[in-house]
Image (cartoon, rainbow, N blue to C red):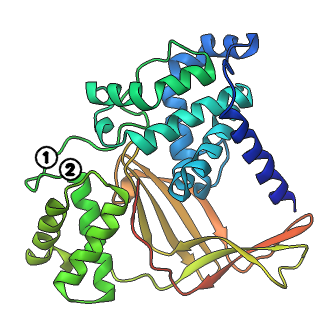
Amino acid sequence: MASYTTGIVALSSLVAVRNVSDACMDSADQALWEGAVKTNISAIQQACILEGAPGAAWYDHCIKHFMNSSDDGERCMQDCVGKRTQLSAPCSGCFAKLSGCVYEHCISPCIDAASPACAACGDEHCTPDFVRCSGIRDLPPPNASHMGMLLAPSSSSNGIPSSIEKVLHDLVCKELTNGTAKGAVVSRACEALHGKVKFLPEAACEEAAKLFWEKGEVAYCKSEVAKAAELRRWDNSNNCTGEYSTLSTDNMNECTQYLIPAPASICVEQKNDTAYSSYHCQGVTDCSKEKRTFLADWAVGVCEVFGDYSQMRVWIAPQSTAVIVV
């Protein structure tokens, strides 16, 4: 019941933002804005997208919530911006709506966040509503780390960014676990990719995927994961028994890749029969060991009690998931 109530409060707060104006114009918000917030707002939003609110688990990073829905991502951003800046909830909500707008409308033109096309898209779709909501008219231009910075410029002979090539290669590898017919594997891989990177030309995707297959590069694919850990929650239970809901699922020994606002990856590795670890890799999408930053160890099979509910991670069969997250 506690989480349900919290969700209703968060949703009500975000809905209220849609109807506010000059939400950042009171003296407290203005003092914070003119202090350290204005010059650091891009870095703050980047931290929210990649790391979530201070102390958030990796599955609560705002990029994960945006993948569920724009509203879910905006709720995460409002909470995170508020906690990182101390701006009021209505003011933080305006920045959340700005990030959601860029995510919805300007991903393709904002591949280069400093480009005229990106600025034009923001002016058309996002800036007017942000100014109306916040009252702020001196928002600094986005830097290369802001939400609009999706990918580095293409250096691929196939006409697609090199970072996308790596993701596509991994998608083809993943589909190999489900069959060996080239056409079907290419189709599934490109369908998964287009679902996340809509601006990528379909022909370029299929050409690159077929080349990966024909060159034998898929021979380096990793084998399918052996198991996964499911985080379950039991309401009104202090011993993890009865009916439960599933909060998240982590496939073991899998690399999840992020493309916005900058390349990154999350690696999950099984330690033993009762625990696994997660790592964050900034700047790379292949979970390179030399780039890993330890996030946390997670116990499996241990029931944790939180007042009127309990949670526990349990081993299950692996889930079929795409490896690209943008």
Left or right: 155, with 54 as reference point: left
Give the residue drawn at x 17%, y 52%: 160
Crowdedness of circle 1 by 10 Å Cα count: few (<14), some, many (20+)? few
Query: From the image, which quarter does the N terminus lie in?
Result: bottom right
Foreground pick, 15 / 260: 15
Residue tagged by mark 1?
155
Secondary structure found at label 2: loop
Foreground pick, 92 / 168: 92
Secondary structure found at label 1: loop
Give the residue drawn at x 81%, y 58%: 3
* N-term mark: 1 or 2: 1
Q: CA distance from mark 1 to mark 2?
A: 6 Å
Q: Is residue 271 something that shows in the picture?
A: yes
Q: How many marks?
A: 2
Three-letter residue code for mark 1: Ser
Q: Quadrant of residue 16?
A: top right
Whether 228 is drawn above or below 15: the answer is below
Give the residue drawn at x 36%, y 47%: 263
Residue tagged by mark 2?
161
Q: Are marks 1 and 2 in contact (CB under 8 Å)?
A: yes
